[in-house]
Image (tube, rainbow, N blue to C red):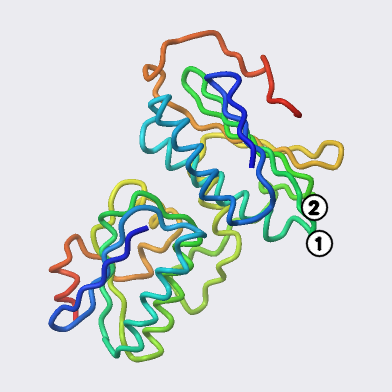
Amino acid sequence: MTTTPPDPGRLCITMCNALNELPRLNQSVQSFLQQHEAPPPAVFAANLALEEMITNIIKYGYDDSLSHDIRITLTREPGRLTVRIEDDGHEFNPLSQPPPDTSPQIEKRKIGGLGIHLVRRTVDAMWYRRREGRNLLEMIIRLPSDTEPAAPSTSNAGSCPGT
Amino acid sequence: MEIVSMKKENAMLIRLKGRMDVVTSPAFEQACDKVILGGDKLLVLDLGGLEYISSAGLRSILGVDKKIKAQGGKLALCNLMGMVKEVFHVSGFAEMFPTFDTVEAALGST
């Protein structure tokens, strides 16, 4: 896993498609969010968005047993945190998935799709597109706007190496 | 995730602290398997120390519930707080298990 911190408001991480990479990803994300004084609900939402979506990519994204890169970018801007995940797995649009069964009868309940449902209910906005054989997923988590000094939006300025 | 098991008079209490995710949930399932094998009929999970839970954590709890029910026992949850509580509600899991505000109330639920 490689981590590139060229921009203080942006964290870029490339990990391979293995669940044992997740603890190191968590550590990097945790320290980035702490540094930016993200409030606990936003930290929770970012963690959930990353774990659920990356776990799906690792478990269902590939047919081969090769190593694949998954690129993660967190961008901290005034009032919002953006979590971006890019992978070269099968085309998969989480926004087109039907909501799971959340009925209370444990025995009857089907459990698939729960992670995506949780993320959709936790983040404030989500968009997906397929480009050049890659899935691009972006999730926006709103932050209280007074937690960092206001500055013009830089959402399109700069990018991580290799993106 | 820190997992602390304590034998109570009529039950086993497991306190969870930290992150319950796809990486840490298997250890929780193993700890519960021991309790179920030990024959305790009531397992109380104190979730007050949990900072984070994902769908993998929820699935683990569901799996433990099925195993203990198969042995004629039951699972009770207590101390759900903050975003962990929110996840239980959004997922519908809060309605699937007996939940209590305190450990004492959960232990008294037999």
Image position of A129 (left or right of A152): right
Q: Position of residue B97 (x, y in %)?
A: 34, 70
Labelled pair 2, 1 in contact (Cβ < 8 Å): yes
**SS class, disc 1:** loop
Give above or below for A5 relative to B22: above
Q: Position of residue B35 (x, y in %)?
A: 32, 82
Image position of B32 (left or right of B58): left
Image position of A32 (left or right of A39): right
Furthest-front residue in view? A2
Q: Residue at x 42, y 26 (%)?
A: A35
Image quadrant of residue A98?
A: bottom right
Q: Earlier in the sequence, mark 2 or mark 1?
A: 1
Image quadrant of residue B89?
A: bottom left
Furthest-right residue in view? A132
Identify residue type, mark 2: His
| Mark 1 chain | A
Q: Are marks 2 and 1 on the same chain?
A: yes
**SS class, disc 2:** loop
Give above or below for B45 relative to A107: above
Q: Position of residue A51 (x, y in %)?
A: 55, 50
Position of the C terminus of chain A by quadrant: top right
Q: Residue at x 55, y 52 (%)?
A: A117
Residue bearing mark 1: A63
Q: Position of residue B32 (x, y in %)?
A: 36, 77
Q: Nearer the viewer, mark 2 or mark 1?
A: 1
Q: Residue at x 55, y 43 (%)?
A: A25
Image position of B8 (left or right of B18): left
Residue bearing mark 2: A90
Give above or below for B53 relative to B12: above
Marks 2/1: CA–CA distance: 9 Å
